[in-house]
Amino acid sequence: MSSVKVGLSLNCSTKSENRMSSKKMLLVFTDSYPYDVGEEFFEQEIEYQARNFDKILIVSQRVPVDAKQTRSLPDNASAKILPPVLNSGWLIRLMKNFFSIVGTKEPIFNARRWKNPVNALQDLKFASKLIDMRRELPDVLQPSDFAGFEDIVIYSYWFFTGVGLGAYLRDTLLKDKNVTIVSRAHAYDVDEKDAPFGFIPARSYLLSKADIVFPISNYASDFLQKVKVSPKAEIEVARLGVPAVNHKIRENSHPFTIVSCSHLAPYKRVDLLLQAVSVLQSRGYEVFWEHIGESDPNRLNAIKALARDTLKADTYLFRGYLANQEVRNLYESQPYSIFANVSDGEGVPVSIMEALASGLPVLATDAGGTRELVHDGINGWIIPVDTTPAQIADSVEKILEIPALEYQKISKSAIKTWDEMANAAKQYSRMAMRLSDLASN
């Protein structure tokens, strides 16, 4: 009997060693990366993933088929484009796909979540789009793409169609492989408050298909926990991060300089911050404001016109769109006093991570997952979302009166928060190791 046990033990050990030594592949579904712009976070993360996987294949879902690659990839990574399903003509495609949608054994939609006909239409539209995308997959991904790889992690960068495509591949092309499906979850793909018509389609279906969902914040995790219906999907927070900069302990500069960074969409409420600066100037404070972001000339011209009519001359500057590295360089070199964000809707703001990394104290509204980064009175200040220009000005007034040593302590805490919660090297190393471990299990 003992010889049999030894033999089994040796066989199991050999099998385990073979599994551990087998090559690992990562298949990633993105919206646009590495084409066009966007998904800069993954642009940083892929360097860490490349160290843990033998091969990375990226499939972009939302760029034209003739899009040019705009970003370089690690040597063991390559990219393909899945022809996008356009919004135009969606109703005709829905009618063509209707019987495929309602006739499936595993419905993509959950009618119990429908609160109105618009919700039903959104679910059906998503299901039709996913079916169309599945039809395109065989022309993009072939068996040769996966040859020599038994352990494959399918990674959807957004908690949306990529998960459904991964599930389809696991059941078809990759049915004889060891496949794990994971997804990040950010903001628009989680928080229905910010979604069109207050509804995100197919969430129950996607949760049932993913093995692990990685929300980027506790805020996003709470949303997913509420709609989780499958015991299968694990939900595990995995934060994003920004690179280190030559951070420094800040001095409270003169003139007091507020910096903000965002595009000029209405929900960012940059005009509200502008009005707050006007209030401060009317109270006799010497305040300078600098805004970074936005490439749309109409939006930029509109905010510039408002500033000319509202603020004192030569007390503001609009830099327009800058690349992330350019923004970080500015934070390193300029004597900004505080970073301000008065948005009424957020996930976990990248702009705040970058400010904290440079030692900038942050004044921000209590929107989305902002509170996870900004700790009131420790590394910055939290104000209500339903604030007014006068109330924002009141908060800045208090900051203006802070003693130098206390201000420096807050600046030091800002750097500490970045290192603990938003350090790209730490966060992406952990994520890469986590996915690599999944491929080994």
Image (tube, helix red, strand yellow):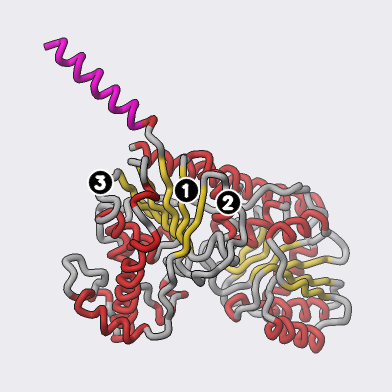
Q: Which residues are magenta?
A: 1-19
> Looking at this view, is 258 or 166 the one in front?
166
Asked if 182 appears above or below 84 in the picture, the reply is: above
Q: Are marks 2 and 1 in contact (CB under 8 Å)?
A: yes
Residue 69 shown left or right of residue 25 in the figure:
right
Which of the image's four quarters has the N terminus? top left
Residue 242 screen position, x and y as percent: 62, 52
Residue 243 shown left or right of residue 29 in the figure:
right
> Looking at this view, is 372 or 349 the one in front?
349
**Which quarter of the picture shows residue 285?**
bottom right
Mark sitting earlier along the chain (3/1)? 1
Crowd around label 2: few <14 · some 14–19 · many ≥20 (10 Å): some
Residue picked out by circle 2: 73
Q: Amino acid at mark 2?
A: Leu
Q: Residue at x 74, y 62 (%)?
A: 338
Gap between marks 2 and 3 measured at Cα: 29 Å
Q: Amino acid at mark 3?
A: Asp
Q: Amino acid at mark 1?
A: Ile
Q: Are marks 3 and 1 in contact (CB under 8 Å)?
A: no
Residue 76 screen position, x and y as percent: 52, 44
Gap between marks 3 and 1 measured at Cα: 19 Å
* Disc 1 secondary structure class: strand
Residue 330 screen position, x and y as percent: 78, 59
Mark identifier at residue 89: none
Residue 419 shown left or right of residue 260 in the figure:
left
Q: Residue at x 38, y 66 (%)?
A: 161
* Disc 3 secondary structure class: loop
> Looking at this view, is 361 or 405 the one in front?
361
Residue picked out by circle 3: 176
Residue picked out by circle 1: 56
